[in-house]
Every structure is written in structure tokens, then in C-alpha cells.
Amino acid sequence: MDATLKKQLEVTACKIRLGIIEGVFNAKSGHPGGSLSIADVMTYLYFAKMNVYPDKPDEPQRDRLVLSKGHTAPALYSTLAQKGFFPTDELKRLRHIGAMLQGHPCITIPGVDMSSGSLGQGISVACGMALSGKITNDTYKVYTILGDGEIEEGQVWEAAMFAAHYKLDNLVAIVDNNGLQIDGKVEDVMSVYPIADKFEAFGWHAISADAHDFDALEKAFDEAETIANQPVVIILKSVKGKGVSFMENNVAWHGSAPNKEQYDQAVAELTAHLKELEG
Amino acid sequence: MADIKKIATRESYGNALAELGDKYENLYVFDADLAAATKTGIFKKKFPDRFFDCGIAESNMMGVAAGMAATGKIPFVSTFAMFAAGRAFEQVRNSIGYPHLNVKIGATHAGISVGEDGATHQCNEDIALMRTIPGMTVIIPADDVEAKAAVEAAINYEGPVYMRFGRLAVPVFNDPATYKFEIGKGIKLRDGNDITIVATGLMVYEAIEAAKTLAQEGIEATVINIHTIKPIDKDIIIEAAKKTNLVLTVEEHSVIGGLGEAVCDVLCENYPTKVVKIGVNDEFGHSGPAVDLLKEFGLSAENIVKTAREAVKAK
């Protein structure tokens, strides 16, 4: 990847992480761990990959993203705010009464392509969008992000069958494999492994990559574009809570907000990292 | 009346889709391995490129339809009522209802008139389930003429619609030359001062027949066809209640959560009136020929006459 672009993406990802912490702290609830683990892929998609138009959020030929793991809405909102769909100040009102930003993604928010949050449902919707595009030869692509725990839902595999059956090669599913779900480690709660083999058995092309390396992300998404007549899944090995030292790989941060002290520490860490990046 | 033409509303649904497919090029149809039974197969035969089988995976089908609608197409999804409203309830609620997407759900084989397949497939709960979803329109056509008109009205309406069709062939009593369908507008089929019979779906014809018998006994019934349970036509119900001060609701659905409760909701807030409900009384169905089951469960003109007679006497 071009070094300048890579640096820009790293800066943007850090700002998105700051927005996630800002949102969850002010909401006094929410899901920081899984939001932080997808911050880099969200950055890559919205700032290096997808054709989206903040001034025309409903442009028919825009690429679409369905956040199937909808509880990580803070990552989506922070990304959309950074991209200019709405002011970053909105993040401070996340989950508040009367606020635009709902606890889980809502289709009425500029830039949000689908309401989601009930696990397993987003991938089906993404399939419908992709099929629709195939039918009328539209040029847009559809991305959907699933949690590794989420793929325990049976509907995910109904959708997996459907996508392969209808050869939806305009669809890319991303599995955020941070290895943790609410009750503990994925392999202890209900193992989903081996993830790639399962999708391959369902007729998908599977790619594995490091979730926090923009070169690896670029390589994975470039490979995805070479695949015809098959849907693609990119399994991203990620760190839950990535970027905030005390949240990393700690399941306690799946669904709880930082207190003032923790918030200050998280902001200090991320701000220091941002300064370092901006040199 | 023995010569009256009978058509199952599922057949009307399939025919309507096929007939309207030319006029509405943006219409697509999904089914979950039941195209022969739901009659979407009629559309499939004519428009194979606009028909998509989802296999036996109703939950995914609802989501796929939501995605199609989110990109501006008009998807119809079909399966049995049990699986559309029951199995996929949460997908309908969260992927279709909450984002208020333009998905049309054509649910067939509703009620106990499914017949021999028995209780697992006889859905008497779908009206209750669907009408609790904010913004969902719920339509239950009474015959072939109404079913076809309802399908076109649903296409021209922007938003989610649940349509309930039956397996059993039922009398075609509406005149296609004069019939007009409007979502949310009930139809008064008969005027009378003694009792108001509010019916929906295949029970509308039974209500008309019952009213004729009651008239011979000197009991004059107002008969109202509520083809749209949601949004319900409050005015027509309140007006009739004011005239008759007695209401009898008739539906091929549980007495919990269906037409009867919807009518009670309207009346208790606006014009408290005694309401007697005929429906499936909080029990499961069982196997048997549809016509016999309808009789057994009291879903017949005979039982409407008996119940109305007693209610009028007790007035």
C-alpha cells in the first residue's frame, strides 16, 4: 500500500477509535470492544474502498455496508461522522433520548444502509441487496460485517447457502474474529471453528487476514475482487478492544462503558498515538 | 347458491402476481420451496427471471426481501402463514418492519382450513403477530375478486404489507365489475338494526349467508367485511355499533389478538358495545377435511346464526 495512504488511514482509524470511546462514554453503555476491533476495516472500507457520497447518502449506485454485528454501531457512526455524513458532535448524544444515533444502526441515519443488530439478520439483507444488483446489472458492491460469535446464528448459514447458490460475487462478508463473545471465548461458549472451512464448504471463497494491518486488508480486498461467480468471506483475525490497552482481549469490555477515569486514560492513549502518527 | 364459483385465495394471489407482472416490471417474487402450494409458481412460469427460490429457509428469505426492497425493487415473499408470521416473526419485525421496507408478504395456508396437515401447519396466530408490528398493514381478502384487488393495492402502497390467503376454495361473491378495494376501508355488505356482524377472510361469505337466514327469523344484521385488519376502519365499526348496539366478530383465527380484539380495541375506546367473538378458542386445530374442521370449530354460517340469535335474545 502507498505509504501516504497508509499513514492517512492509520490517522483516520485512530480518530474513529476516539469517536467510539467518546460515544460509548457519553452513552454510559454500549459495546466498545467489538467496535474497536473493526475500526481498521471500517476505515479501510470507507476511506480506501467503497464508493459512498456523504452529500448524496442515498445515491443508488453507492456501495453498501450492512453492519450485521449491529451492536458495534459506535464504529459505524464514528466512521460515518469522520467521512462527513453528519457532525462528530452527534457521537456525544449516542443512545440519548431524542438523539439521531440509536443504540443499534437505524436506516434513517445518513449513511446507514440498513437497520441491524438482531444477530444473523444483516447478512441476509446484504444478500438481497447483492442479488438486486445482479438482476439489474448495477455496479455497486455490498459488504457485510459479522461477529465471530454471530455466526453461531443459524440464519447466517441459510444466507451463506443463498449467496453461493445465486453466485453473489458482488458480496463480501467480513467476519471479525476477535475470539470473544459475551459469555467468554468463542471456542468455550460454542466453537465456530474452523471458520474458513465452513464457508468454503458452503461454496464461498475464503480469505484470512490480519484485521489491524492496512497492507493485509488491501491485499485481502484486492483478492476478493478477482473472484467471480462466488461470494467472498474475509476472516479478519482481530483484537477485541484494539487500541486501548486495558480493553484489549478483555471480554469485560464487550458491552460496558468506561467510567471517567477509564475514559480519560483511553483518550490519553489514543491521543498520544494520534500525535505520534501525525508526527 | 350451490352453483357459485369457488376459488382459493392462494390461487387468486398467484394469478394476480402473474397478471400484474407485465404492468409492474419492478415486481419480484420469492418463495421457500412452496411455489406449487402458495401458487407463486404461476408467476414463476411466466417470469422465471423474476422468481427466486430461497429453499426451506424462511428467515433468510425475509432478510433477502428486505435487502431487495432497500434497493428500490418490490419483492413479494411467500410461504405458509405459519412460517411467514411464525418462524420468521423476528425477521419480519426487525429486518422489514423496523426499517419500514417495501416488502409484501403473501402468506398462504392460514387458519385451520389448511385441513389434513393438522395443527403444526394451521396458523391461527398470524394476524395477532403481524398487527403488533408498528407500520405493518395486514390484509385478509375474502374472495378471488378481493384478493386480486388487494395484491395490486399492496403494490401501489409504499411500505410493508402482510396478506393472508387460504388453501380452501371459497365462494366468489364480489362482483368484479363494481368491486372497489381501498386499504383500510371496510365494506358494508348489508344493513340491519339488530346486530352487526364483522367478518374477515373466508368468514365474510359465511356472515352474508348467516344474515340471510337471520332475516328469515326477523333478525336484521348489518354485515361488514373488514379486509384490512390494520389500519382498521374505525368509522365503519363505530357507526354500525351505534346503530345496532351489539357486535359479533367472526374470523378463522384465534380469538386472541385477531379481528375480534381489533374491533374491541376500537369500540372500548370510542363506543363501548357488547362484542361476541367467533374464532378459534385458544386451542390448537387438528387433522381433517377443511370443510368439516370449519364446522367443528364453529366457523360456519350455522354457528353465526346460532350465536347471533342468542346474542340478540340476550340484548
Image (tube, coloured by chain):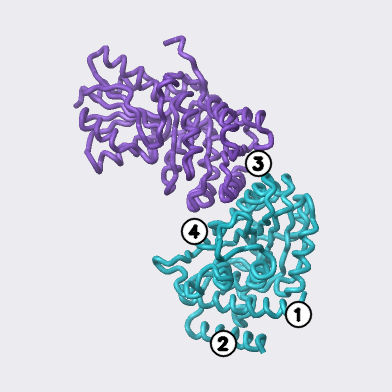
Chain colours: A cyan, B purple
The amino acid sitting under disc 2 is Ala
Q: Real-space Cα distance between discs 2 and 1?
A: 26 Å
Q: Quadrant of residue A73?
A: bottom right
The image position of residue B132, as x and y in percent, is: 41, 46
Q: What residue does disc 4 label?
A: A108
Q: Residues within 10 Å of mark 1 (few under 14, many from 20)?
A: few
Question: Which label lies toward us, 2 or 1?
Answer: 1
Which chain is mark 2 on? A
- Mark 2, secondary structure of its residue: helix
Q: Can residue B287 be seen here?
A: no
- Residue sitting nearer the eye, B39 or A86: A86
The image position of residue A205, as x and y in percent, is: 78, 56
Q: What residue does disc 2 label?
A: A268
Q: Residues within 10 Å of mark 2 (few under 14, many from 20)?
A: some
The amino acid sitting under disc 4 is Thr
- Residue sitting nearer the eye, B245 or A183: B245
Pointers 4 and 3 in contact (C-beta within 8 Å) = no
Earlier-in-chain disc, 1 versus 4: 1
The amino acid sitting under disc 3 is Cys
Q: Residue at x 60, y 42 (%)?
A: B58
From this view, report whether residue A169 is shown above or below residue B197.
Answer: below
The amino acid sitting under disc 1 is Ala
- Mark 4, secondary structure of its residue: loop
Pointers 1 and 4 in contact (C-beta within 8 Å) = no
Pointers 2 and 3 in contact (C-beta within 8 Å) = no
Q: Residue A3 — which label? A: 1
Q: Quadrant of residue B280?
A: top left
**Callouts 1 and 4 on one subunit:** yes
